[in-house]
Amino acid sequence: MNKGGEKNMQGKTIGIIIVVLVIIVGGYFLLRGDYQVPTPTSTPAPTVTSEKTEEPTETQSTTQVPTSGATEINVVGTEFNFNPASISVKAGEQVKITFKNNGRAPHNLILEGLGIETKTIGGGQTDVVEFIAPSSGTYTFFCSVSGHRAAGMEGSLKVE
């Protein structure tokens, strides 16, 4: 091989190495940190008077509190799980899910097959969805951000 061809090959190899290092370092910074699984509590969440005035905290994530006829459920998302991962409601009841992203990556919550979903939100942000619980059955909810569901970010909504 001539010297020009060798330099071109070396340049491509160095370029590939740099791209791989950038991906590895970027992944490290995206996923680093202390990811403790939130522990369920039985402390009731405060009554929410406005969707944006009070946000659920990690310790309130499993609480169901009826307010103005709706069952209120707070769900916290992190890398890569939901807490609680299992929700139970009664068919036909009004349900209000407040989803808070306590992770670093963007997340959302989608109820599969029901057309119900939150916005994709960044860490520390909250979104709310309200709906009438469908007929009895078990429905899956998940995060649709690429690779998150495959990494285990899904749960179930049991309608009785």
Image: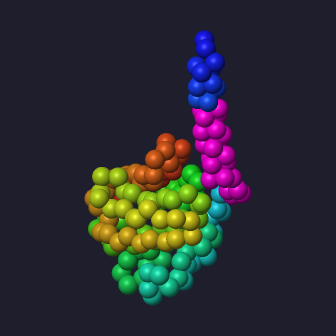
Residue at the (70%, 56%) spot, across then down: 33
Q: Quadrant of residue 8?
A: top right
Residue 143 visible? The answer is yes
On screen, residue 45 versus residue 90, left or right, reads: right
Residue at the (63%, 48%) spot, across then down: 26
For the stretch drawn in magenta, the main secondary structure is: helix
**Colour logic:** rainbow
Image position of 7 with respect to 109: above or below = above
Which residues fall within the magenta stretch?
Answer: 14-36
Image position of 110 with respect to 53: above or below = above
Q: Position of residue 82 (x, y in %)?
A: 53, 57
Is residue 141 within the magenta segment? Answer: no
Residue at the (49%, 44%) spot, across then down: 147
Is residue 20 within the magenta segment? Answer: yes
Q: Position of residue 20 (x, y in %)?
A: 62, 37
Say which of 28 and 149 sits in front.
28
Location of the C terminus (image quadrant):
bottom left
Image position of 155 with respect to 40: above or below = above
Q: Quadrant of residue 70?
A: bottom left
Q: Residue furthest right?
A: 34
Q: Residue furthest bottom?
A: 49
Say which of 34 and 68 sits in front.
34
Image position of 133 with respect to 111: above or below = below
Q: Quadrant of residue 6?
A: top right
Say which of 63 and 152 sits in front.
152
